[in-house]
Image (cartoon, rainbow, N blue to C red):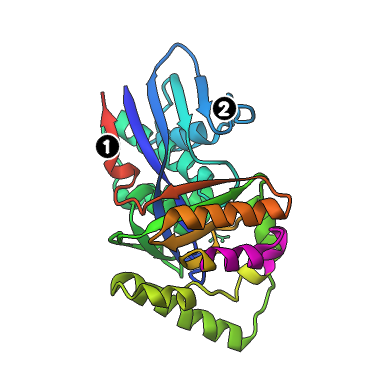
């Protein structure tokens, strides 16, 4: 049997649109074993809506590896134990894809290199800042212009609070509302912010995160989909958040902090005041990705 654990991810980290992503200590687990026919069992998040058929995203990724190698896939049983909330901006689709790819690669005796797995993951998901940290762990900076280039950076000692509201946003919809052009001033501000984001994290100048997590490329547009977004962001800061942003394409929000409980409580209250049910998670940046969390049992 193959078992793989895949971390959740938070893409963008504020200004790093399509460029910076981080793995988080919430996991989906996939177990694969031989079976007479395809069987998919789902536990945890998404049990009521994840497909048990051949269109299941984990299975599609699993199948893609066999296809890549020109092989007919074996019949398998997939057991999914999901902790990552679906369609909230926490990389649930990336986790599904990376789980399928890494498990198939292990099942077949590791024929594909990490670069090939990354390429397949990006081909299926589209956004390297989501799939790369799920595969590699850590903080990853990525480019697709024109070659795919992903560089893993180490994790840092901060708590990460996630406030996950009780509604979904599909990434495709959250991309449709982005403008085709942006002001030069806004582009310049994002370049500055992302430079400060990386500086803050890797020189431990955490007081710079407030500026380093500001964004003018996607958050102003997507925040309109989250009731009270900027109010909640301010409440989190007052409770001790160092930097706050939309996680991925939302609607979850991510806050870096040294005092996670008060920040989680403040975000919860602020969402509830707006009449939005919310769950909060206190997590950490996650060093190891699926590549290192796969076992043959
Ligand atoms: N960088 C992507 C976006 C991540 O923000 O649209 C979503 O998967």
Farthest residue, direction top = 36
| Quadrant, the C terminus | top left
Q: Disc 2 on helix, strand or loop? A: loop
Q: Magenta segment, which residues?
A: 221-237
Q: Horizontal and vertical percent for residue 68?
A: 41, 40
The residue at which mark 2 appears reads as: 54
Frontmost residue, 48 versus 73: 48
Vertically, is 248 above or below 5?
A: below
Q: Where residue 156 sits in the image (x, y, percent)?
A: 30, 61
Distance between mark 1 and mark 2 Cα atoms:
23 Å
Name the residue nearer the viewer: 59 or 7: 7
Q: Which residue is mark 1?
A: 110
Residue lying at 55% horizontally and 33% vertically, measured from the top left: 45
Horizontal and vertical percent position of residue 39: 50, 18
Q: Secondary structure at mark 1?
A: loop
Residue 2 versus residue 211 in the image, above or below:
above
Quadrant hosting residue 65 = top left
Q: Residue at x 47, y 74 (%)?
A: 210
């Amino acid at each position: 049997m193959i078992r793989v654990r895949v971390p959740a991810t938070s893409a963008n980290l504020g200004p790093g649109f399509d460029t910076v992503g981080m793995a988080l200590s919430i996991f989906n687990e996939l177990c694969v074993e031989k079976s007479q026919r395809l069987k998919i069992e789902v536990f945890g998040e998404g049990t009521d809506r994840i497909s048990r058929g051949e269109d299941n995203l984990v299975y599609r990724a699993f199948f893609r590896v066999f296809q890549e190698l020109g092989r007919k896939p074996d019949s398998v049983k997939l057991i999914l134990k999901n902790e990552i909330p679906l369609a909230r901006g926490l990389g649930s689709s990336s986790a599904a894809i990376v789980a399928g790819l890494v498990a198939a690669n292990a099942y077949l005796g590791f024929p594909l290199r990490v670069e090939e797995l990354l390429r397949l993951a990006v081909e299926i998901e589209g956004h390297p800042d989501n799939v790369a940290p799920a595969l590699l762990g850590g903080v990853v900076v990525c480019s697709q212009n024109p070659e795919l280039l992903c560089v893993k950076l180490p994790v840092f000692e901060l708590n990460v609070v996630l406030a996950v509201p009780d509604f979904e946003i599909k990434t495709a919809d959250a991309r449709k509302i982005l403008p085709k052009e942006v002001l030069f001033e806004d582009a310049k501000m994002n370049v500055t912010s992302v430079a400060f984001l990386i500086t803050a994290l890797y020189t431990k100048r955490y007081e710079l995160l407030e500026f380093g997590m500001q964004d003018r490329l996607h958050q102003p547009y997507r925040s309109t989909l989250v009731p009270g977004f900027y109010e909640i962001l301010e409440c989190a800061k007052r409770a001790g958040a160092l930097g706050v942003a939309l996680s991925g394409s939302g609607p979850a929000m991510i806050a870096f902090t040294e005092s996670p409980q008060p920040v989680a409580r403040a975000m919860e209250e602020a969402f509830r005041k707006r009449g939005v049910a919310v769950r909060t998670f206190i997590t950490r940046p996650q060093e190891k990705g699926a590549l290192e969390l796969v076992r043959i049992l």
